[in-house]
Amino acid sequence: MASFKCSTVVCVICSEKPKYRCPACCVPYCSVTCFQKHKDDDSSIADFLDSDEEEDRVSLQNLKNLGESATLKNLLLNPHLRQLMINLDQGDNKAKLMRAYMQEPLFVEFADCCLRIVEPPQNEDS
């Protein structure tokens, strides 16, 4: 199985040190239990992607672009930002957390980076 030399890589489910990568999407995970949860999440994502709300959907290409962005990857190396993301993911009142986190310059930089990738600025000359 794959081994990881970079100490900043963590399991996508529990944030422990990973031992494996998903064969479908290459995200790191540490155990069979975490892999099962990841697969369950993937089926939930597939259900969401099949929903009828086209206007709010990010294209698969843009999701891939997010995953390949060196700038975004560098931002996510910051432990403070990663903790904010974990808190947001696990929080009960996500809207309240988002309002608070949008006051954090690091989080705003992260959000702006994501938006530039998903919705690139339009050239005013075109």
Image (spheres, rainbow, N blue to C red):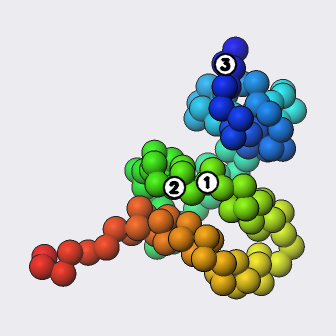
For the residue marked with disc 2, what is the amino acid? Answer: Leu
Query: Picture quarter containing residue 110?
Result: bottom right
- Across and down, in percent, residue 9 comes to 69, 38
Badge 1 density bin: few <14, some 14–19, many ≥20, Cα 10 Å: some
Distance of label 1 from label 2 (alpha carbons): 6 Å
Q: What residue lies at 62% left-to-right and 58% top-to-bottom?
A: 48
Q: Secondary structure at mark 3?
A: loop
Q: What residue lies at 80% left-to-right and 44% top-to-bottom?
A: 15
Q: What residue lies at 68% left-to-right and 62% top-to-bottom?
A: 81
For the residue marked with disc 1, what is the amino acid? Answer: Leu
Residue contact at pointers 1 and 2, CB within 8 angstroms:
yes
User: Circle 2 sits on which residue?
Assistant: 72
Instruction: Work out which residue is located at the far left of the displayed protein and give it.
Output: 125
Q: Secondary structure at mark 2?
A: helix
Query: Picture quarter containing residue 125?
Result: bottom left
- Across and down, in percent, residue 35 comes to 78, 33
Q: What residue lies at 60% left-to-right and 77% top-to-bottom?
A: 105
Badge 3 density bin: few <14, some 14–19, many ≥20, Cα 10 Å: few
Which numbered disc flags the more N-terminal residue, 1 or 3? 3
Which label is found at residue 76? 1
User: Circle 3 sits on which residue?
Assistant: 2
